[in-house]
Amino acid sequence: MTDAWQSDEKFGAMASYLPDDVPLPAPPTEKLSKNAMKKQLKGNKKDKKVKPQWGDGSDKKKEKKAPPPKAPEFVNMTPKGEKKDLSKIPMADAYHPKAVEAAWQDWWEASGYYSCDPALAEGKSDDEKFVMVIPPPNVTGSLHLGHALTAAVEDTLTRWHRMKGHATLYVPGTDHAGIATQSVVEKMLMKESKQTRHDLGREKFVEKVWEWKNEYGNRITTQLRSLGSSVDWSRERFTMDDMCSKAVLEAFNRFHESGLLYRDMRLGNWSCALKSAISDIEVDYIELEGRTYLEVKSHAGNKDDPKGRYEFGTMTSFAYPIEDSDEVLIVATTRLETMLGDTAVAIHPEDPRYTHLHGKFVIHPFNGRKIPIIQDSELVDMTFGTGAVKITPAHDPNDYECGKRHNLEFITVLTADGAINEHGSEFQGMMRYDARIAVEKALDAKGLFKGKEPNKMRLGLCSRSGDILEPMITPQWYMNCDNMAKRAADSVRNGELKIVPEEHEKTWFQWLDNSRDWCVSRQLWWGHQIPAWFVTKKSEEGMSKLDMAHNDRWIVARSEADAMEKACKLLGCSADEVNLERDEDVLDTWFSSGLFPFSVMGWPENTEDFKAFYPTSLLETGCDILFFWVARMVMMGLQLTDILPFKTVYLHAMVRDKEGRKMSKSLGNVIDPLEVIHGCTLESLISKLEAGNLPPKEVVKAKKDQEADFPDGIPECGSDALRFGLLAYTVQGKDVNLDIKRVVGYRQFCNKLWNATRFALQFVSDFNPTPTLLNDLMSSGKMAVRDRFMISRLMACCESVNGCFDAYKFGDAQQASYSYWLDDLCDVYLEMIKPVVYDKSEENNNSRWAAQATLWIALEAGLRILHPMMPFVSEELWQRMPGRGTLGADEPVSIMVTKYPECNSAFRDTKVEESMDAVMKVIKACRQLRQSYNIANKVLTHFYVKIENGASEDAVKSQVDDIKTLGKAETVVVNPDESTIPKSHGIVIIDDQTTVLMDLTGLVDFGVEITKLEKSLKKTMPSLTQLEKKMAAPGYEKVNDDIKALNADKLDGLKKKVADIEAAIENY
């Protein structure tokens, strides 16, 4: 351990249990102890060191140890699904996550602990059951730390409720992820067989996707098992399985039957990369401050730019010739290619510059089309630019509304993939941004180009593909969300639905109070095909399904047979005269996800699961999908079941890297949870950086960070450490800036927990617990103050952790349990009872029994407290507790089905805790004095405690033996006669009522120590004096501010060094 850690008692205690293969984090910068300061003051002196005759703080000369032999690779010998037989597995000397976590998950699953009988749950009150569905991760995905945080929070709650005796169900599932999955399989097809999905055809392509899903799509469920998630795998759902598909079919039909779902030709967001419409909330925006060059992957590249990039963030002006006139009308646009679809030029009706143009036309320069000049006071600001605005109703939202007001022609000039179509004259076939360049050149050649200026603008990107979006008019299916959104918003306003943290309510209302109709159709093949058919008579020819004049020919049905029956009724003919053509589009993935809380329970059927487990208790997810998913579940749940799908929404924060950046593969900062659980090499971390899209400079910086943080890679930490570490970050409402080194630190806590328990089990190896042990102990009359203190701290921990879980304060619950184990149990109680347990004399029987009973209770309950957060290590250690299997017929066989500890207020003793607090202050003063004077551990010292009369004095007097134990004292005299206190003593003033003194007679050579300090002071003073003169010299105010700041810091350091040395000399 480094010197700088020596003064950190807690870390010192924890690190002493570490195996040699676990690296220590860098020490913190803290005020040095006197001893550490003296060592630092020696500097790099190479003079012969004077060996202190009074000890160097250790019991024997330290020798450099050879590294321990590498532990053999662990092999799990437990048959799958069977309980691990610990009687055949000796308890290891150190914590090894792989060995500890092996076999338990399979046994828990096989034992049926994760399932819940609906007969048990039905009829129970909300306070007696807990039901939650997992936010279904994309079937294409693999776990990232956001998933790990979700799993840690959700499983902690689930295990806690299960241990509280509630009917508990946690339902897993995966999302079919329409766009992402189709993209993955299309890339695979192209790579393997150079085929597109169109080469295969829809039916064969969908078969390929199912093959891919069945082969690769279950990786994430395996990873969830590694994290210990106690989901009911027997109820696992996939959003395109039969049960969920049935719910989607029924929901679409019910929405249509209620008049909420309709088909319309509207302007919407179009992704040329996906060749599909997307909804408004799937749009990301980037702000351009002016002229900006961007890469467009779907284009061959701009030949005029060395890097092939295209220009954005400019306003281009061009002139329209006015019909039968030499005059022109100048307009401006940021998207020049859209002028190919202009169908009007708008001016303000009151603009005197253009009164003579009312009722006139301009001529399109490329196709000769006559374009009307219209008057529109709503759209045109006559003080902006030329006061004339080009109108492209088919490619701009504002122009779209203007076009409807003036009954203009709507001309679409783009194909589905973003090329110019047949309306683009000589530019047909060009990709949109290549056409932009060509149109500018063509206008310039005609003398109509009037210039280009930088222009601030906002660019909409598809959140799925990153493609620059185009406003396009296409026929789509829409859902009217007005009433559903109002009900969802009102449910929060009236308190029926609770959002935690409350600060997210503002976002909830912002979205729902301004909701728009939801475009639910997508132009994909993978997904739930829309159950709608376009119907015609076989005798009818040329009737287009894209023509909105025939929109009444669309039939929504639950099956093709149902559609045929409706078609015959609509057309008044027999089935053999009818053509049915099903809509090729699929539903937005969020449509099926929005049904998830009740579709997984069997809705629309009134199944036993639906009756018992719907509505669910809680929806836990990330705050980034509050509207994408959470609001839609509430809206759809209220509309289809007339019940809120859950009572509470808990939103955890976004997980970012330690510098606050969003984690993404392109930045190379994504850490796979399995890399933390199983460990990974530095080489594998760096290879991920090199495979990312970081600029070369950033790669160099990131590599240095990785090499500094993990010179030997990430050590194997295990699932428990990862879960416990992630929970420590869950401060409500705050983004998680995750430093993996801090998570690695909790691996050290696991090791401390392991070794402390292993050590403590020696104390109770001959102890026989009883089913009523706690009550037996509390009524025994055998307990010492330290025993009552330990039980009181246990009760306090129970109260705190239960309250924190109930309020979703997982970070506070984690800290309370951490503090209980390290501060109360390990640092205090375990140390205090050593002499008591080692004393097996008959007269000590009662005290020894009370200490053993208290320790057994503190360990066993402490493990139960930890279990929801750290399931594996808590189970392993709990199973090793003495007396296991002897506590009667009702004894649980697993910690996960035990009762969660609760606070018994009768056993909470605040007076004992206050008494112990006074005692611990004295003990810490004793330790501080020994450390200050570098007293060897084997040397026992004499202490004198001066303390005011009262409760504190009584406490100290009653626990003199405990002070002697933890303070390494030969004697402790409370309130001695002044004449008995040696003149040579060290002193610590705790407060105005308590002072501790230590006899230094024969322990310290004052002359040697003072001489060292005086030499160091003599060397330091000239540097201080010289720097002060420099900073006081005339003209110093002209010195560079950075140098001034450095000098000021240096001066402060030198002054502190001098003050510390002088204080140390004075203390001697």
Image: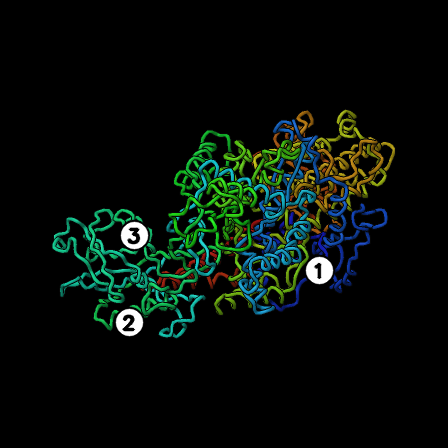
- What kind of element bears circle 3? helix
Which of the two discs, 2 and 3, labels the residue nearer the N terminus? 3
- What kind of element bears circle 1? loop
Kindly identify which residue carries mark 3: 399
In the displayed structure, 613 sits above or below 464; it is above
Between the C-alphas of marks 3 and 1, the distance is 67 Å
Between the C-alphas of marks 2 and 3, the distance is 25 Å
Quadrant of the drawing holding the N terminus: bottom right
Q: Mark 3–mark 1 contact, CB under 8 Å?
A: no
**What residue sits 27% from the left and 71% below the top?**
442
Q: Amino acid at mark 2?
A: Lys
| Residue 1033, image quadrant | bottom left
From where the camera sits, is residue 82 visible?
A: yes
From where the camera sits, is residue 976 visible?
A: no
Rendered location of residue 225, percent (x, y): 68, 49
Kindly identify which residue carries mark 1: 21
- Colour treatment of the image: rainbow
Which of the two discs, 3 and 1, labels the residue nearer the N terminus? 1
Rendered location of residue 676, percent (x, y): 64, 56
Between residues 759 and 475, which one lies in front from this camera angle? 475
Circle nearer the viewer, 2 or 1: 2
Counting other residues with Cα less than 10 Å from the Cα at mark 1, is it few (<14), some (14-19), or many (20 or more)?
few
| Residue 19, image quadrant | bottom right
Between residues 410 and 439, which one lies in front from this camera angle? 410
Kindly identify which residue carries mark 2: 441
Q: Amino acid at mark 1?
A: Asp
- What kind of element bears circle 2? helix
Q: Amino acid at mark 3?
A: Asp
